[in-house]
Image (cartoon, rainbow, N blue to C red):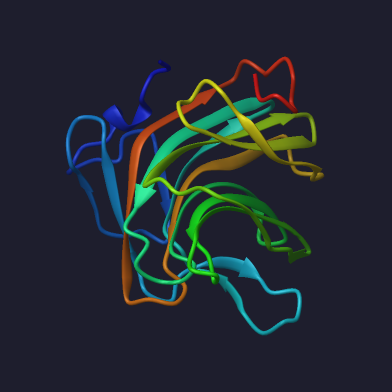
């Protein structure tokens, strides 16, 4: 098991992380971080121009070059589009999210969003458990999104190119676009600068 960077966070300090859109948080135990996302929060640039937001809580580090970011996440699935999210952020027009989300079909789903000027929105597989491992990897300007049951075995969600800066923000986002608030749990979080050998396999 990789090092859990959440152990560097306490109830009085976020350690090596920084906030965009700071939100209430709590360390449930040594490993577990709970972020409470306020209502009407999201990161999404609607392709039809109706819903443009970048107000969701985002706890991040700046990373240069290739990386592998993994997290074990879960939440209560109370409201539509509530999600535990891994996100990469270059700027408002270049970012991407891998979400464990309550879909608008009422399912627990793996959802991906890539913003390159505007956002797309791609519902993936339904995942009928309460928690999941997520992973985002980078090699140059190629990014891969994966999910899996144990942090070792991965299923590819998406492979895409995004011409981002060499140094970008990467981390944990908690969102609640349609509800009053959402409690999002991160049980494990790690950043590894050793690139993966196979982007499609995620290993």
Q: Residue furthest bottom?
A: 50
On screen, residue 111 above or below 181: above
With 49 as the anchor, is 71 left or right in this view? Answer: left
Q: Residue at x 64, y 29 (%)?
A: 64
Q: Give the percent coordinates (x, y) of residue 39.
A: 37, 74
On screen, residue 32 above or below 45: above
Q: Give the percent coordinates (x, y) of residue 177.
A: 47, 73
On screen, residue 48 above or below 101: below
- Classify the position of the C terminus by image quarter: top right
On screen, residue 112 above or below 164: below
Q: Give the percent coordinates (x, y) of residue 191.
A: 50, 27
Instruction: Please tell me in which quadrant of the rendered image residue 14 appears.
Output: top left
Instruction: Please tell me in which quadrant of the rendered image residue 131 appears.
Output: top left
Q: Give the percent coordinates (x, y) of residue 198.
A: 74, 19
Residue closer to the observer: 9 or 173: 173
Instruction: Please tell me in which quadrant of the rendered image residue 69 appears.
Output: top right
């Amino acid at each position: 098991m990789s090092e859990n960077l959440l152990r560097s966070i306490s109830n009085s300090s976020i350690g090596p992380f920084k906030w965009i859109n700071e939100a209430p948080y709590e360390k449930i135990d040594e490993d577990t971080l709970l972020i409470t996302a306020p209502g009407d929060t999201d990161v999404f640039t609607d392709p039809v121009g109706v819903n443009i937001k970048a107000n969701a809580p985002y706890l991040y580090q700046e990373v240069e070059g290739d990386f592998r970011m993994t997290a074990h996440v879960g939440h209560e699935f109370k409201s539509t589009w509530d999600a535990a999210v891994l996100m990469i952020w270059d700027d408002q027009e270049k970012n991407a999210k891998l979400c464990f989300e309550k879909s608008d079909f009422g399912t627990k789903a793996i959802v991906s969003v890539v913003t390159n000027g505007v956002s797309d929105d791609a519902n993936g597989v339904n995942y009928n458990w309460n928690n999941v491992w997520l992973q985002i990897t980078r090699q140059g300007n190629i990014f891969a999104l994966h999910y899996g049951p144990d942090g070792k075995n991965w299923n590819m969600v998406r492979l895409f190119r995004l011409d981002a800066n060499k140094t970008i923000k990467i981390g944990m986002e908690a969102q609640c676009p349609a509800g009053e608030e959402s409690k999002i749990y991160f049980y494990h979080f790690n950043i590894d600068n050793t690139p993966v050998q196979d982007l499609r396999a995620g290993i």
